[in-house]
Image (cartoon, grey):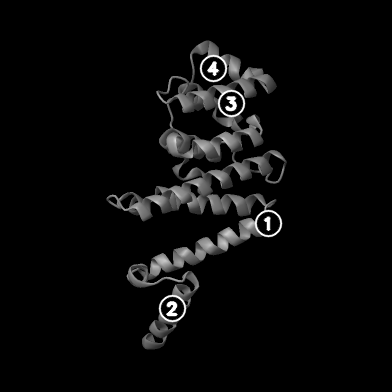
């Protein structure tokens, strides 16, 4: 029975190698992948397919974004030791996470997910902005223009806490968000501005909040 399972697993991997069109050194690298990595790849393909097939489905966008976020922030993705391919894969995953999270926020504000947590996803996006502003700035520039500023109303204290961030791009996005929120719901911005801002949270609290 074990032999049959091993043969089935190898057959599945061979099919995946053919699909990827891998050769030489790239093929050898995939041969060395643990079975868990193959399962993760299959899960990712399913989640991406669901997100692409149902662009107006909030949960599909959220699950795909979460998968990409975990892939890009995983410790294994950080230990490449100068591996350009690993760094590129990490960046691609984080870019997909940003796009997926912003798409989810747009759908949530349209009422697609009325029971949604208003804090977890904005905190994760804020964490990505703080840590990767230089590389993900383009994704944030485009997505912030298309997403209602009120999607960030749950993290106004955290935005105030980053007004003095050393990265100009971060400060610019934070200021723009607070101004936009203040125009719609001035009471959310006036009180923290008067008392001197809020908590100093860079989004770490979102580590498990958005995963449901």
Decide: few, some or many residues near mark 1? Use Cα within 10 Å; few <14, some 14-19, many ≥20: few
Q: At x 49% / y 52%, what residue is drawn?
A: 68
Q: In the image, which is nearer the foreground, mark 2 or mark 4?
A: 2
Badge 4: few (under 14), some or many (20 or more) residues near its Cα, within 10 Å? some
Mark 1 and mark 3 residues within 8 Å of each other at the beta carbon: no
In the image, residue 144 lies at what x, y percent? 60, 34
Q: Residue at x 56, y 34 (%)?
A: 141
Ranked by sequence position, the earlier of labels 4 and 1 is 1
Q: CA distance from mark 2 to mark 4?
A: 58 Å
Please indicate whether residue 156 sits to the left or right of residue 13 in the image: right
Q: Is residue 202 visible?
A: yes
Q: Which mark is residue 14?
A: 2
Judged from this view, the residue extending furthest toward the top is 194
Q: Which residue is mark 4?
A: 192
Which secondary structure, mark 2? helix
Residue underneath mark 3: 177
Image quarter hosting the N terminus: bottom left
User: Quarter-wise, where is residue 167 in the image?
Assistant: top left
- Which is more N-terminal, label 3 or label 4? 3
Going from N to C along the chain, the mark reached first, 3 or 2, is 2
Expressed as whole percent of the image width and height from the top left, the position of residue 139 reads: 54, 40
């Amino acid at each position: 029975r074990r032999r049959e399972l091993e043969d089935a697993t190898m057959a599945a991997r061979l099919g995946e190698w053919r699909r990827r069109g891998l050769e030489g050194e790239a093929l050898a690298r995939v041969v060395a992948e643990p079975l868990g990595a193959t399962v993760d790849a299959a899960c990712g393909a399913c989640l991406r397919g669901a997100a692409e097939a149902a662009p107006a489905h909030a949960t599909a966008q959220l699950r795909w974004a979460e998968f990409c976020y975990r892939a890009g922030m995983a410790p294994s993705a950080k230990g490449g030791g100068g591996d350009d391919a690993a760094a590129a894969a990490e960046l691609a995953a984080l870019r997909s996470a940003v796009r997926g999270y912003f798409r989810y926020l747009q759908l949530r504000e349209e009422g697609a997910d009325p029971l949604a947590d208003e804090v977890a996803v904005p905190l994760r996006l804020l964490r990505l902005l703080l840590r990767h502003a230089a590389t993900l700035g383009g994704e944030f520039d485009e997505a912030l223009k298309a997403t209602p500023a009120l999607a960030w109303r749950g993290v106004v204290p955290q935005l105030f806490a980053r007004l003095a961030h050393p990265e100009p791009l971060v400060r610019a996005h934070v200021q723009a968000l607070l101004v936009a929120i203040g125009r719609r719901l001035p009471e959310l911005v006036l009180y923290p501005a008067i008392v001197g801002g809020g908590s100093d949270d860079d989004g770490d609290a979102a580590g498990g909040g958005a995963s449901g």
